[in-house]
Image: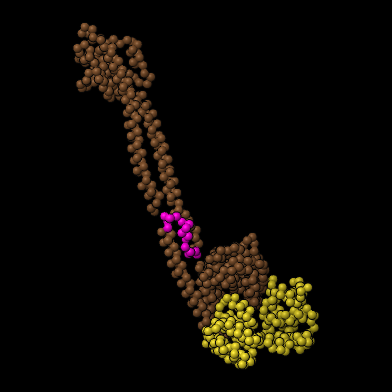
Chain colours: A brown, B yellow
């Protein structure tokens, strides 16, 4: 299990707290139960002293003159049974209960002693006193059962321990809450990190985080910066490589085309056409890699973010796309309305170009392809609908993976088109989805952006 | 026709100039932009092909210097950058057309041809598209050497399209161009004129392509000459 900061704090705080509570409970018990018990002992001693008054010595004969009334009074106790025994100098019973055990050991004169004993299989408290009866020493014992003492103990326990327990629970709850509160900056920090887009490698704002997490945030920011730098370096490399690739490819293509223009041999022409097509594909791939590098976060250092009307972007390409559609006699249609968003025009063009190229590339001859753009409820959209064979539902997610190809299709595409479209869409906080064309035949690719997209 | 090619990549410069030569054009090639304006003042060229990414001063600067000396040569810009802003920038500076690298050599040849034809038609007052000839001076049209009757609106539409071969034009553009300020033509009216033109031009294999929801494009003439 992961070590929890909360658990560790509780472990440090709770045992000492529990020890303190237990110690305090014990102290409370001794401080309140003993004195209370002492009061009852005193009453018991007083009863013994009172009984000693009833001893009389008449000419050497010891008499215990206890009136019935006094005896009744003595025994009248609502909660406890009272017993007593009066014994002569030789331990003979003069009055009272015979079986009450005599006290053991020497007793000082006229001083009572209180002790615990057993009588009739009950625990009793006994007060014993030695008293002078003529020339002899008599012993008087008064015993009572422990009921009212027990009741008092129970009362005291309830009265002191219950508040103690409630206090303990309260303290526990307060500690729990307090730890939670104290740890909440950490929770907030993890929430901030959780909610970051993986494309966002900017520093966490230190002012928004508490003092205690400052060093953590600083370390995180340093890591983010390193990641960002290495990302930037990689991006620059791809961009430069793609750019550098295109010039020689253009040369290769031009050379092949020139040879095509000049060569009369049919077999030669065939080969040259293949060289030409390969060069065209390679240079398209270079363009796409460049676009991928550009759609990475932090690429805004390279490309400016402006207000863009998707309609204008489409209109810029109408020539190009109509010419592309012509060889297969594809009926290319436009339904364009203003669709204004924030973004990088270069990337949005590449996005559209990829979607349209795909539709034109994979549609059969005489197919129908329709491009639409517009704005609905704060979102603007661009969509491409074709009347081709469509994309089966099970491939609609996979289609956005780089180098994915629908099984059974053959095209000259790199397989990067939709991956780029997705990257660019994400960079513009948009959504891209594939569905079946409303006409029932073909695919519909739809990209939508919030009109106030926060591009990164 | 005499072409000045300004391109610093030797492979591209070589293949482009060889291709142009194979079409019977005279080509001079340079890899620096600085002397271009002076060269053009001294020697008469018909077309300038200008690469944007040059060592030293770039293609845009060359174009600015050429135009500031009031040299009215047709200019075709070549750009390796795929930023359309480059193209727009070039066109604003007075370029007549642009091509993005890597381009198809036949397309470059066609564009150069079109540029020189445009220049020629300004001198001859003639627009030529395969078997179709419009004399803008006498306002008469011929198809396969036969006189072609056109209404004023049909004439305006055809002239507009012939100046933009292989370029898609929107209905709005057509409406503004041939309708004038007072009565901008409705989409339906334009469809009617296009359909009438098609009826007249179809026998000569001249095709006006419909771009659904957008406009029209006069296709490059490819029928048997």
Is A206 inside the magenta-drawn segment? Answer: yes
Q: Position of residue B81 (x, y in %)?
A: 56, 78
Q: Is residue B15 visible?
A: no
Please, which residue is most extreme toward the top here? A59
Q: Is residue B189 above or below residue A67?
A: below
Please report the bounds of the magenta region as a residue range.
Answer: A199-214
Q: Is residue A115 above or below residue A444?
A: above
Q: Nearer the viewer, residue A387 or A168?
A: A168
Q: Is residue B53 above or below residue A132?
A: below
The quadrant in which the C terminus of chain B is found is bottom right
Residue at image x 47%, y 60%? A204
Q: Position of residue A145 (x, y in %)?
A: 32, 22
| B52 relative position to A76: left or right | right
Q: Is residue B206 visible?
A: yes
Residue at image x 67%, y 71%? A333
**Quadrant housing residue A136:** top left
| A67 relative position to B117: left or right | left
Q: Nearer the viewer, residue A16 or A151?
A: A16
Residue at image x 57%, y 89%? B35
Q: Position of residue B200 (x, y in %)?
A: 77, 81
Q: Nearer the viewer, residue A441 or A311?
A: A311
């Amino acid at each position: 299990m992961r070590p929890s900061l909360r658990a560790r704090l509780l472990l440090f705080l709770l045992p000492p707290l529990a020890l303190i509570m237990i110690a305090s409970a014990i102290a409370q018990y001794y401080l309140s139960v003993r004195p209370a018990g002492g009061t009852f002992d005193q009453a018991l001693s007083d009863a013994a002293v009172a009984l000693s008054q009833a001893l009389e010595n008449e000419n050497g004969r010891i008499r215990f003159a206890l009136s019935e009334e006094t005896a009744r009074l003595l025994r009248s106790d609502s909660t406890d049974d009272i017993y007593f025994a009066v014994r002569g100098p030789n331990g003979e019973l003069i009055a009272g209960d015979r079986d009450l055990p005599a006290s053991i050991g020497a007793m000082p004169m006229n001083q009572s002693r209180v002790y615990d004993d057993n009588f009739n299989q009950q625990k009793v408290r006994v007060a014993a006193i030695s008293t002078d009866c003529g020339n002899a020493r008599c012993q008087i014992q008064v015993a009572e059962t422990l009921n009212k003492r027990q009741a008092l103990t129970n009362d005291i326990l309830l009265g002191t321990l219950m508040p103690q327990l409630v206090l303990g629970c309260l303290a526990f709850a307060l500690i729990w809450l307090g730890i939670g509160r104290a740890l909440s900056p950490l929770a907030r920090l993890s929430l901030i990190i959780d909610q970051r887009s993986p494309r966002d490698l900017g520093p966490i704002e230190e002012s928004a985080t508490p003092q205690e997490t400052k060093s953590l945030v600083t370390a995180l920011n340093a890591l983010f910066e390193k990641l960002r730098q290495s990302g930037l370096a990689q991006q620059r490399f791809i961009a430069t490589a793609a750019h550098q690739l295109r010039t020689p490819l253009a040369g290769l293509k031009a050379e092949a085309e020139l040879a095509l223009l000049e060569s009369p041999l049919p077999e030669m022409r065939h080969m040259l056409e293949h060289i030409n097509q390969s060069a065209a594909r390679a240079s398209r791939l270079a363009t796409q890699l460049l676009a991928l590098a550009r759609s990475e976060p932090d690429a805004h250092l390279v490309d400016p973010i402006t207000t863009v009307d998707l309609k204008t972007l489409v209109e810029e390409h109408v020539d190009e796309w109509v010419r592309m559609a012509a060889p297969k006699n594809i009926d290319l249609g436009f339904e364009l309305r203003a669709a204004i968003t924030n973004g990088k025009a270069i990337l949005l063009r590449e996005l559209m170009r990829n979607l349209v190229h795909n539709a034109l590339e994979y549609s059969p001859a005489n197919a129908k392809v329709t491009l639409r753009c517009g704005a609905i409820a704060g979102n603007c959209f661009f969509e491409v609908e074709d009347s081709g064979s469509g994309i089966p539902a099970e491939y609609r997610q996979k289609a956005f993976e780089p180098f994915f190809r629908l099984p059974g299709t053959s095209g000259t595409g790199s397989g990067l088109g939709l991956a780029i479209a997705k990257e660019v869409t994400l960079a513009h906080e948009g959504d891209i989805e594939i569905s079946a064309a409303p006409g029932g035949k073909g695919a519909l690719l739809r990209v939508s952006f919030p009109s106030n997209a926060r591009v990164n | 026709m005499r072409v000045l090619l300004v391109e610093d990549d030797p492979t591209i410069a070589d293949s482009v100039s060889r291709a142009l030569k194979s079409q019977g054009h005279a080509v001079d090639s340079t890899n620096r932009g600085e002397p271009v304006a002076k060269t053009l003042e001294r020697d008469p060229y018909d077309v300038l092909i200008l690469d944007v990414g040059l060592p030293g001063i770039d293609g845009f600067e060359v174009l600015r210097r050429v135009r500031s000396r009031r040299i009215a040569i047709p200019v075709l810009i070549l750009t390796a950058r795929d930023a359309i802003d480059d193209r727009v920038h070039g066109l604003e500076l007075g370029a007549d057309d642009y091509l993005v690298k890597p381009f198809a050599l036949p397309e470059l040849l066609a564009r150069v041809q079109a540029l020189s034809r445009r220049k020629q038609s300004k001198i001859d007052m003639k627009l030529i598209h395969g078997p179709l000839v419009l004399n803008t001076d006498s306002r008469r049209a011929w198809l396969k050497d036969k006189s072609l009757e056109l209404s004023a609106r049909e004439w305006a539409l055809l002239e507009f399209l012939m100046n933009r071969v292989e370029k898609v034009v929107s209905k709005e553009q057509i409406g503004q161009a041939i309708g004038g300020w007072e009565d901008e033509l409705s989409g339906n009216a334009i469809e009617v004129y296009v359909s009438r033109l098609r009826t007249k031009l179809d026998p000569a294999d001249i095709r006006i392509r419909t771009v659904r929801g957008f406009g029209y494009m006069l296709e490059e003439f490819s029928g048997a000459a």
